[in-house]
Image (spheres, coloured by chain):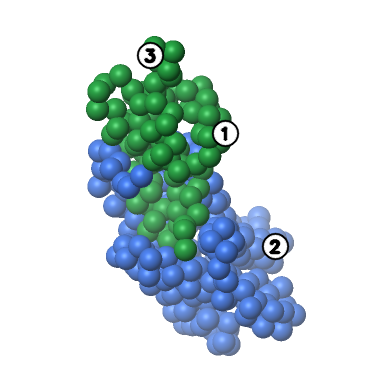
Amino acid sequence: MQGLVLMEDVLQFIGAFVAFSIAVVSYKGVRQTKSSSLLRLAAAFMFLGAGFLLEGLYQLNTLYVIPGLEVSVATLLIAGLFLETAGYFFLAFSHMLDVFFDKRMGVMLALFPLMAVNQTSLVVILTSLSFYFILYGVVETLFAYSKNRNPNTLLIACGLAVIAGGWWVSLVSPDGLMLNIVQLLMKEVGLVTLFIPVLRFTFNKKSGWNGPV
Amino acid sequence: MAQYRTQTKIIADILVTARDMNTAGDGVGITTLLRKGNVSYNRMTKLIADLVGAGLLEEHMLEKNAKYKISERGITFLTAYSQFEDFAQSFGLRL
């Protein structure tokens, strides 16, 4: 039992590492190109990383590794979930801006009221919002793939879809440690897929730009 | 439908024009930049002033006409743009 909780905890910290790595590369891009898209991407993954970190601390607390934190267990969980939701929001927001500037309809926006406001618990609302934002990200990334035909974009869409699957598991299933692990594993697999562009960026630097004018 | 271009993309397009159309070696004029950059004259003059101010373009006066060359800093910007464009595109975003 404690082993599974520990595993869940390790997965949270791996998630935080992956998210912070993507945030760092994105921020490097902001400094070099002043791109607002990269700024939103950096913000999204900074929030996600912080969210994972707080949820990891929450798990550590349930293992009584950090004795002084007992009083703030609920705060840690809510803050972690809130930051994670904020991260997914920024990810979706970048796509929303593309939708706005391209003057085309964002199909998933119509589903928003159905997804987000039919539950009362704060945790469930945050989970619903995260699920909605990530699903919106999947749809828009797939739409981007239909235009640019970049295999990496398809890979990211699949990664986001796996993360969305993880959120869906947590939304529709009752609480249980094994299900938590399944949900977390799905989120980790998705996040590791998102890490691939960072690896490509690190190992495959091009010398110049010859794109169309 | 024409695709929306971000400010960063427009800047990259201007720098690529200044780099690739400079066949004579003395820089390119504003007419060439306008033709390839596909922005209005007013916006282009403001962008050029900003790019010269930021050190991405170099301005030379040739027989009372201003000519523009890409600077070392501009080439560095294009290299970074290339790398991060690929990165952003992976996430389905435009730089």
Chain A visual colour: blue
Q: Which chain carries label 2?
A: A
Q: Is disc 2 on the same chain as disc 1?
A: no
Q: Which chain carries label 1?
A: B
Q: Residue at position x 43%, y 28% from top?
A: B30
The quarter of the displayed image where residue A53 is located: bottom right
Distance from disc 2 to disc 3, alpha carbons, whole Å, reads 67 Å
- For mark 1, does the 10 Å Cα neighbourhood hold few (<14), some (14 to 19), or many (20 or more) residues? few
Mark 2 touches mark 3? (CB < 8 Å):
no
- For mark 3, does the 10 Å Cα neighbourhood hold few (<14), some (14 to 19), or many (20 or more) residues? few
- Name the residue beneath numbered marker 2: A75
Q: Residue at position x 38%, y 33% from top?
A: B32
Chain with colour green in the figure: B
- Name the residue beneath numbered marker 1: B42
**Residue A146 pos. (x, y %):** 37, 70
Three-letter residue code for mark 1: Asn
- Front one among A38 and A110: A110
- Front one among A57 and A195: A195
